[in-house]
Image: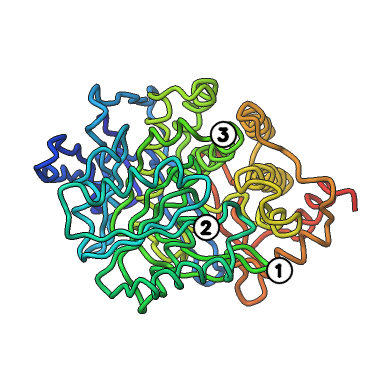
Amino acid sequence: MAAAPSSIRPNRAISLSTASHSHKTSLQPLLRFPASASSIPSRSRLCFDFNNRNCAVKASAAPTAPVMDQSTSSSPTVPVVVEVDLGNRSYPIYIGSGLLNQPELLQRHVHGKQVLVVTNSTVAPLYLDKTIWALTEGNPNVKVGSVILPDGEKYKDMDTLMKVFDKAIESRLDRRCTFVALGGGVIGDMCGYAAASFLRGVNFIQIPTTVMAQVDSSVGGKTGINHRLGKNLIGAFYQPQCVLIDTDTLNTLPDRELASGLAEVIKYGLIRDAEFFEWQETNMPALLARDPSAFAYAIKRSCQNKAEVVSLDEKESGLRATLNLGHTFGHAIETSFGYGQWLHGEAVAAGTVMAVDMSYRLGWIDDSLVKRVHKILQQAKLPTTPPEMMTVDMFKSVMAVDKKVADGLLRLILLKGPLGNCVFTGDYDRQALSDTLHAFCKS
C-alpha cells in the first residue's frame, strides 16, 4: 500500500493492516505509521481561531506526481483495516469483499451472549440470515434476535426508535449485549443512538450496506434521529466496536442510492484531499459502472480521511465540522421538502453547489473550481440545484436551527483557496449568503 506524507499532526499514529484470512486466527498486529508517513494523503493542517470560531483546513503543496494506489488483494477474504485512533476507544474499520463470510471478524467484537440486529425491510431479506450466521457460526452460546424497521428517512424518528427499545426490553437484554446495525445511514444512526441510550450504553457494531454509510456515516460515532423541525437534532456521539464493510453488499444497491453516496466521496476531495478529487474526475465512470477495484479504493481512501479527522476532533469542535460541506444547505432541503423525498446525498450535492457558489461570491475560490464541481456532480448523476419548491425563507428558517449555529451565529463550511482547502467560519459577508439563496430560489 503506497504511503504519502501528511502534515496535519506529525506525532499522530494512523493504523492500517491486513487481516489474516484464517477463520481460526486473530488479526495480525496492526502496522502503525506516523502521520508524517501515513497512507492518508490529505497533506492538510488545521487552523482554529477560538475567538472568532473559525476553522481552516489548508493543504500544503502536493507532489508533482501524486500516488494513486488502487491495488486490492487478490483474495476476497483478506480485508484492509483502517484504525480509528481514539485511545482506549479505538476501533477497526474492516474493508473487503465477502467479509460476512468470515465469522471471526464480527465475533471478536461481541463480548456478551446476547445480540440484537437492527435492520430494515429492504436489507433483511438480503443479508439478515447471513449476518446471524456470521454471529453464531461455531459460537452456539450467543443468542441473536432481530428487529426489522420500515425503510426510509421518514422513519428516522422517535416512534420508530421505540421499536428497537421494545425489542431489547422484551428480550431482556443486559448491559453486556451488543446491538448490530445492518443497513444504510438511517439504520446506523438509529441503532447507534439506541445503543447509546439503552441501559445508558451498550456495545454496538456497524455493518453498512450503502455507499453513503460505508464512506461516511458508519464511521465516527455520530448517531441520532430527525425532528420535524430539523435533521439529526436529537442524538449522541457514540463510537462502535468496529465497522465491517463488506463491499459485496453494494451489488444489490439501486443506482440512485449508489450515486447518492458518491456525494460524500466527492466532499473529501474538495475539503482536504485534492489528489483524491483528481482521481475521481478520471474514475467517475468506473465508479458508476460499479468497478470493484475503483470502489474498493474510493471506500478505503474515504475511510482514511474520515478516520483521521475523527481521531483529531471526535466531537466536532472545529476540524470535524468541515466534513459537513454542503450539509447546512442540504439539510434545509431534506427538512423542507420532506424526509426521504430526496436522498441525503442528493440534497448534499445541491447544497455543495450552493456552498461553492457562495465561496466564489466571497472571492475565496476561482471560477475554474466552480466549473469542476458542477462537472463532477453531473458526472455522478447528482442534482446541482435545489428542488423548485424551495424558497429563501425555507432555507433561512431551517438553517437558523442548524447544529453549527453558535450564539445565534450561523457558521458554514466554505471552500477557500486552491482545491483541497476549506474553512469553518461565521466570519463572512451575509450579503453573499443572501445572494446565493436568491440565485437558487425563485422567491
Circle 3 residue: 254
Between marks 2 and 3 in the image, the one whose residue lies nearer the viewer: 2
Q: Which mark, by number, is residue 200?
A: none
Q: Which residue is mark 2?
A: 149
Picture coordinates of residue 366, whole percent (x, y): 66, 36
Quadrant in which the N terminus is drawn: top left
Could you give the CA–CA distance between mark 2 and mark 3, rounded to whole angstroms? Answer: 19 Å
Of discs 3 and 1, which sits in the foreground? Answer: 3
Q: Secondary structure at mark 1?
A: loop
Q: Residue at x 52, y 50 (%)?
A: 121
Image spot of residue 68 (x, y percent): 37, 25
| Image location (x, y in percent) of residue 406 | 60, 73
Name the amino acid, label 1: Ala
Q: Residue furthest right?
A: 443
User: Which callout, 2 or 3, points at the residue further toward the start of the chain?
Assistant: 2
Residue at mark 1 to residue at mark 2: CA–CA distance: 31 Å
At 52% from the left and 58% from the top, the residue drawn is 149
Residue 419 in view here: no
Q: Is residue 262 above or below residue 282?
A: below
Q: Is residue 53 visible?
A: yes
Residue assigned mark 1 = 400
At 28% across and 44% down in the image, what residue appears?
82
On the picture, is 86 further left or further right than 219? left
Percent across and percent down for residue 325 are 58, 50
**Left or right of residue 378: residue 3:** left
Residue 9 versus residue 260: which sits nearer the camera?
260
Give whichever of discs 1 and 2 has the lower sequence position: 2
Q: Pointer 2 and pointer 3: residues touching (CB < 8 Å)?
A: no
Amino acid type for the residue under numbered disc 2: Leu
Residue positioned 71% across, 46% down in the render = 354
